[in-house]
Image: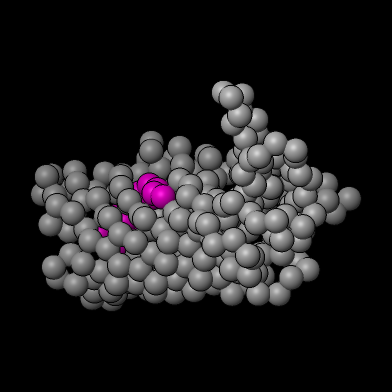
Amino acid sequence: MKSFLLIIGLSIFSLTTQSQILITLLFGDKLNSDGVEFGLSGGYNISNINGLETKNSLGTFNMGFYFDIRLKNQWYLYTGLLAKSKLGVDKLSTKDIEFLNTDTYPTNGNYSQELNYFLVPILGRYKFKNHIYLEGGTQVGLMYKSWIEYNSDIDGKKAIVKEYNTQKVNKIEAGLMLGLGYTLFKGTGWTIGAKYYYGLTNVYKDREGTNNSSLFIVLNIPIGVGEKPKKK
């Protein structure tokens, strides 16, 4: 019964986040005010899982929305939701595969661990007058799906096999995040930046010291913000 309720809850949450992204596109300019900036957030992240033998990073795209809320003077609170985001590691070693107890195949191929999360950053941000900003705080996440992915390409014959191991991974993810960036168009346009995340929780239930880390390359697109200065 608990598993059924959890599936229903995650399904509703997933549909809600997709709806919120559509709301961002359609009504983002209405949600912005003098003290709040609202828009789409996306980019590319390069992640790893510490505590495994492999050191090969996994690169994936992410997408969501954000709020940039003015607190006082040049201090802001940055938060939001990455509704489509993935962490993990690539090119698992033989020891990693044995630890994960996954099926293996006779042909040569690549094994990777991929984890899907809803990620929520909660960061304090300081904006300098030259439109550069520094930020720091925490990021929390909810894992809703994970799998070991096997990829092979032999003589033009490609194979992709996913073996789900969601039950072996902790649902809650939390850690520290630092970042910096720059706001284009004299501080009123798109924002480009980079954030580094270091997880403080174990990825796997039965192994200590397995924590996520990731470098996020970020592009934020405010909705309707550029129209307000023109009207003024």
The mark total stands at: 0
Q: Identify which residue is drawn at 83% across, 51% down.
A: 3
The answer to whether residue 96 shows anywhere in this view is yes
Residue 75 drawn above or below residue 108: below
* Residue found at the very far right of the displayed protein: 1
Q: Identify which residue is drawn at 65% across, 74% down.
A: 209
Q: Identify which residue is drawn at 29% across, 72% down.
A: 134
Which region shows up in magenta?
A: 32-44
Q: Identify which residue is drawn at 44% across, 74% down.
A: 137
Apparent side of residue 23 relative to residue 16 in the rendered image (left or right): left
Q: Main secondary structure of the magenta part?
A: strand
Instruction: Tell whether position 33 is magenta.
Output: yes
As rendered, which of 199 and 76 lies closer to the eye? 199
The answer to whether residue 145 shows anywhere in this view is no
* Horizontal and vertical percent position of residue 156: 57, 23
Instruction: Tell whether position 209 is magenta.
Output: no
Q: Quadrant of residue 72?
A: bottom left
* Horizontal and vertical percent position of residue 13: 63, 47
* Horizontal and vertical percent position of residue 99: 76, 61
Residue 70 drawn above or below residue 168: below
* Horizontal and vertical percent position of residue 167: 78, 55
* Residue found at the very far top of the displayed protein: 156
Apparent side of residue 1 relative to residue 9 in the rendered image (left or right): right
Apparent side of residue 205 relative to residue 226 in the rendered image (left or right): right
Display coloring: one colour
Apparent side of residue 50 relative to residue 208 in the rendered image (left or right): left
As rendered, which of 25 and 215 lies closer to the eye? 215
